[in-house]
Image (spheres, rainbow, N blue to C red):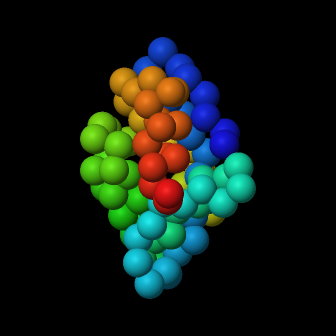
Amino acid sequence: MNVKETKDGTVIEVFVKPKSPKFEVLLEGDEVVVRCTEEPFKGKVNKELLKALSKFFHTNVELVSGATSRQKHLLLKGMAKSEVERLLRTANP
């Protein structure tokens, strides 16, 4: 799991799979995989990703890098690394 704590919050690396039947946050091995329902057209996946993960983590989420890639780095504002890891582990028991 690629998670780094910064002064602004925690940055996580996620792999996005668009056009999935339902939105899910999964841990596959050591990688965070997010399945989005939207198709990768005009930033729809990024909008869905930021909105859904903001609800999931209960904080503001910003796209740091990977706007046009499936591999993305996201900043979870004001969250500690330990809290992010705990929430990710509860995403798929």
Residue 9 position, x and y percent, is 44, 25
Residue at 44% across / 84% down in the picture?
A: 21
69 to 89, vertically: above or below: below
Residue closer to the observer: 65 or 37: 37
Q: Quadrant of residue 4?
A: top right
- In the rendered structure, the answer to whether residue 6 lies left or right of residue 29 reads left
36 to 74, vertically: above or below: below
Q: Quadrant of residue 79?
A: top left
- In the rendered structure, the answer to whether residue 39 lies left or right of residue 78 reads right
Residue reaching furthest to the right: 29
Residue reaching furthest to the top: 7
Number of marks in the rendered image: 0
62 to 21, vertically: above or below: above
Residue closer to the observer: 19 or 1: 1
Residue at 54% across / 55% down in the picture?
A: 67
Residue 78 position, x and y percent, is 37, 24
Residue at 45% across / 24% down in the picture?
A: 80
Q: Quadrant of the N terminus?
A: top right
- Residue 82 visible, this angle: yes
Q: Quadrant of residue 37?
A: bottom left
- Residue 65 visible, this angle: no
Residue 33 position, x and y percent, is 59, 60
Residue 10 position, x and y percent, is 50, 29
Residue at 71% across / 55% down in the picture?
A: 29
